[in-house]
Amino acid sequence: MTLPRIGARKVRESWQERFAGTPDVLKTEQRQQTVVSVLDINIGGDSFVTMAGPCSVETESQLMTTAHCVRRSGARVLRGGAFKPRSSPYSFQGLGLDGLKLLAAARRETGLAIVTEVMSEGDVPLVAEYADILQIGSRSMENYSLLEAAARSGRPLLLKRGMVATLADFLHSAQVILENGNPHVILCERGIRTFETAMRNTFDAAGIALLKYVSHLPVIADPSHAAGHRELVPALARIAAAAGADGLLVEVHPTPDKAWSDGEQSLDFAEFEELMDSLDPWLALRSAAFREPAFARLVEAAG
Ligand code: PEP
Ligand code: MN
């Protein structure tokens, strides 16, 4: 069956119209893929980049053993929160500067790049001094003064999708960063709030495919915060790879049941290694996602 040509073209172009408010994040013929480079790591290039580590930096031995483990299993970036956005004021708030120093020591010891969250505008210079990538958390996605300050630091930014943000809202925040002169933006899908409560959030795999379809920015997936339960993390990670994600952000802890935050969704070392070893067939699907004829046509329509 052949589609009426005008109608088919309209459907393809509607994505461009839908996201017309954020022109700089959209693919064009000239700009099909941004690659964000950190140390010798390219995010958004051909290789799939895994960022892994504890939810929070707790102690030197916790961080160092985790850093060595995730590096051995193939991660290139170490995650770990020093400033923690917690829903309760009575939960662990992070080690602050001491946590940043431990992250820098882990980088020296392992060569892994560091991603860590910055929660306030005033902390940007300090966090930017220690981290290779600044994480903007889900709760901060629409904090425009933070986005502007973080953008001006010149560091690559990992922008997490707000838990109640539409894809258009998400791209709007990315546009704000680009407008403030920082092109090094990595989008991170981490699950959204829906009526489903069995999992911590609902993982938006379609959102990953659509972001890869319309935007030139790298997209990574956080299956840990999306699932909220460690047994679901590997499946979501593999789905993300098949949907075309450029990498993962995964919580890993030496003894998840004793973690100071997010233990229930953290993988232990053996589980993380098993996850990394299972990715290959799914990464083959990831490459296939980019060979879709529709993908080339979108670029044509935009150009
Ligand atoms: C985190 O990565 O530890 C975190 C707090 O994530 P989010 O902002 O997505 O909740
Ligand atoms: Mn966490």
Image (cartoon, rainbow, N blue to C red):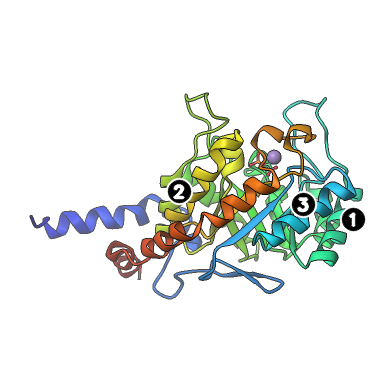
Query: Which mark lies nearer to you, 3 or 1?
Result: 3
Query: In this picture, is 287 found above or below 242?
Result: below
Query: Label 3 near label 2: C-beta < 8 Å?
Result: no
Q: Which mark is residue 66?
A: 3
Ligand 2, by image quadrant, is top right
Q: Secondary structure at mark 2?
A: helix
How far apart, in angstroms, are the residues tagged by discs 3 and 1?
Answer: 16 Å
Query: In this picture, is 252 found above or below 30?
Result: above
Tell me residue 245's x, y (percent): 49, 56
Residue placed under numbered mark 1 in the picture: 101
How far apart, in angstroms, are the residues tagged by discs 2 and 3?
Answer: 25 Å
How far apart, in angstroms, are the residues tagged by discs 2 and 1?
Answer: 35 Å
Tell me residue 199's x, y (percent): 54, 29
Q: Quadrant of the N terminus?
A: bottom left
Query: In this picture, is 287 found above or below 262?
Result: below
Kindly indicate the quadrant of the structure image that contains residue 218. Answer: bottom right
Q: Residue furthest left?
A: 1
The three-letter code of the residue at mark 2 reads Ile
Viewer can see residue 169: no
Query: Crowding at label 3, few (<14), some or many (≥20) Cα neighbours within 10 Å?
Result: many
Q: Nearer the viewer, residue 217 or 168?
A: 217
Query: Which mark lies nearer to you, 2 or 3?
Result: 3
Residue at position x 83%, y 47% in the image: 62
Residue placed under numbered mark 2 in the picture: 239
Tell me residue 251's x, y (percent): 67, 45
